[in-house]
Structures are given as structure tokens and as C-alpha cells.
Image (cartoon, helix red, strand yellow):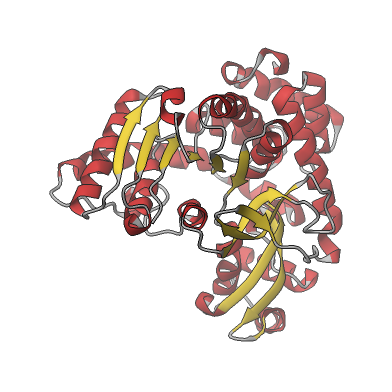
Amino acid sequence: MAQVKIAYIGGGSTRAPGTVASFIRQAANFSGSEIVLQDLDGDRLDLVCRLSRKMAHAQGAHIKITATTDRKAALDGCDGVLSSYRPGGFEARYQDERIPLNHGAIGQETQGAGGFFMALRAIHIARGLVEDMEAVCPDATLFNYTNPVNIVAQAVADHSPIKVVSLCEGPIVFPGELAELAGMDPTKVRAVMLGLNHACWSAEAEYDGQPLIPLLAQKLEDGIADDWARRWVDLAVTMNSLPASYMKYYYFEREMLAELSAQPTTRAQDILADVPSYWQHYREQLEAKNPTLEPELSRGGIFELEVAVDVMDAVFNDRGEVWPTNVVNGGAIADFGASQVVEVPCLVNRQGVRPIAGYRVPPPVRGLLSALGEYQQLAADAAWDGTRQGAIQALTSNPLVRTLPLAQTLYGELARAHRAHLPERLR
């Protein structure tokens, strides 16, 4: 098995213990490797490091785990870099959600104006990250988990020689989730999803060897009680393709806006309310003889699919496996330009992560995906080295914003709210 050095940027986050636990579960595939946790919060970084070491020791994992607040030191000599950070924390995400809602628009971590400002903050950090990588580990691959993963990857791919691949579990889990909502067994679903991140659709979909869409149509005709489940199944049947769950914000925009506006808290507030219990659980497990992370008391990566770890294993151990990832298209999907970052099945081995050609986006959704692709490019350009004017142009192009007065209002308020996390040119 490959012995590699991996830097985990954001290694002091609430998600970090679960991600390290995923490495530990695959310890045989990374035996003799080193994981360097890097974060700006030294206290939380120290807690995660000590807990990770104890979990590794308890499970007999031969993985060295270290920590530092110095990013360049963490990157030195790395083979891979896992990027999973959140500039401004969940407090910033709350602003991304609440400010658009105050103006009758959807704000979400990756969608609409909220997703746009997450991209601006994330790419501001990513630019410095890849500059450091160019200096101390130019041959390393950036495995990006930072949202919005497609826009971050687009910016890096356009402006840096660093190899970049962005990861998301969505294409793997969306089909099963949809089938389960329709009362079907999610383990019997096989689907190929492609398009853009959080905007992927199925090119193929089967259930126990049979075409899935007709079976969903029958379930819809028989009746589905839950409103959201019925909408998602109806969208799949109408478009003859399984959608990412995030498509609800576009095809049911009014309904989603009403639902989000009626809720007393945003998703960020709900997470913030749980954050103290996460850290309490980690502190308790640090004192346990055999630390075990409970899914309901941890955030991310616990007993869940952690596709970044699987893709790293496939690269460094030359597996020759197929995984859905976000990479430069290179002509693989005819509906997008060659330089566009797309979400597509890829062959993953020691040579890297290469998109498999020959797929097409379903015709009924090409218009929306084309618009989202243009927005993705404009947002990446504005975030990397653009101006306030270019950023407002990008925001106006977002299908959940559309009008110039709304874009100008949202940009003004969100830029003020996130001033500390934006470069001067975008304030």
C-alpha cells in the first residue's frame, strides 16, 4: 500500500474527527502514511489531533497523525491535500441564508446568493492555498471538499497548475434517497449521475435490473403522501431523469421560499445549536479507553460514505476504480465546454482522475444547466481576481437571483456582512 503524506486543511473543524475516522477505517490502505491536520484554531486543532491519535491507537492503525497551525509547514512534501474549511464559520453561513430570505430570495450554502458568497470567501482562501502548494508541494493533488466544490475547482483549474479534483457524495446518494422516499429499497438502485455539482441528473437509472423511471411513475400514480417526496418523484418522472435534491430550489422555487421563510431558524442556526454538543462528545471520547464517535453526536464522516478518502485510496494505490468527481470536462460531456468543471464518472488510478467520455445531459434540463454553468464560470472569475462589478454581474446571472436590483441589494448587504473575509477589490 502507498505510504503518503496528506495535509488536511480545516483539520480542527467539527467535521474533522469523522473524516480522520474514515482514514482509520481504511488504515490498511494508508499504512505508514502521515496525516497533518492544519487549522487556525489551535485549541480545537489540538483536541482533534489527540482524539485522532487515540482512535488510531485503539484500532491498531499504522497512521501517523500530526498537527500545526502553519499551513505552509503542513503542506511541505505532501502527496495530497484535503481541503475542507469554512471561512467565517456557521455564523457566516447564517448570513448567507438569512439576508437573501429577508429580500424574498433563497439563500443556501451552495445555491443562490448565499452559495455565491460562500464561493467568494472560499476561493479567497483557496488562492493562497494553491500558491503555497506551488511553492512546497507542486506535484501534490488538491482533493477539495470545500463548498461550493464546483466553483472552487473551476477557479483553481483556470488559474493554477495544481491538479485539482472536487468531491461530493451527492451523485452516489441522491438516487437511493429518491427511491426510498417513493417507498422503494435504495440498495437496489443503480444510477449514473452527471452534470454540475448539486445540479446532476441521471443518464442511466435502474432498479433491480429494471428501468427505474416507470416504477417511479407508478408510485406517483398510486399516491405519495409527503409533499417533498411527491415533488421530487414528480420532477424525476416529468424530466425522465433522476435529479439532485438541490434542484428543488429551481423547479419549486416559490414553494421552497415559502417553506424556508416560515421556519423559525435557518439550517446554520440549527447546526450552531448542535456545535457545543459535538465538541462535548469529542472531549468525552478523548477520555474514553476505546473512543467511538456516535453519528448523532458528530458531524460528517461517521459511518457515512467519505468519497474523498476512497478517491485518494484509488489514486495512491492505483485502483483503477470509477468514482463520480468534479474535474475539468475536456470534452467528456458534449453539453459543456472543454474547460468547464463538471460532475461526471471518472476513472481513478495512479495517473490521476480522468472523466469518462460519451455521456449527455438529459435534454429537458440542458437549459438550466447551461445557465448554471455560465454562472459557475463568472463566479469563479470574480472570486479569483475580479472586481465588485464583475461579482455583481455573476450574481445577477444566478438563476435564483436574476434581476439587477435584487443582485445589487443582496451584494451590498452580504459584502458588508462578510467584509472581514473578502479581499478589498470585492468589498
Residue farthest left in this picture: 289
Seen in the picture, residue 40 relative to 244 is either above or below; the reply is above
Residue depicted at 40% across the width and 30% down the height? 38
The x and y percentages for residue 269 are 48, 37
Toward the viewer: 226 or 249? 249
Q: Quadrant of residue 98?
A: top right
Q: Is residue 379 left or right of residue 315?
A: right
The x and y percentages for residue 56 are 25, 48
The x and y percentages for residue 43 are 30, 25
Q: Is residue 184 left or right of residue 356?
A: left
Seen in the picture, residue 102 relative to 64 is either above or below; the reply is above
Quadrant for the C terminus, please.
Answer: top right
State the count of labels: 0
Residue depicted at 39% across the width and 41% down the height? 16
Q: Is residue 417 left or right of residue 402?
A: left
Residue depicted at 63% across the width and 65% down the height? 227
Residue depicted at 86% across the width and 55% down the height? 367
Toward the viewer: 346 or 154? 346
Toward the viewer: 289 or 143? 143
Seen in the picture, residue 409 relative to 25 is either above or below; the reply is above
Toward the viewer: 278 or 37? 37
Q: Is residue 35 visible?
A: yes
Q: Is residue 101 visible?
A: no
Quadrant for the N terminus, please.
Answer: bottom left
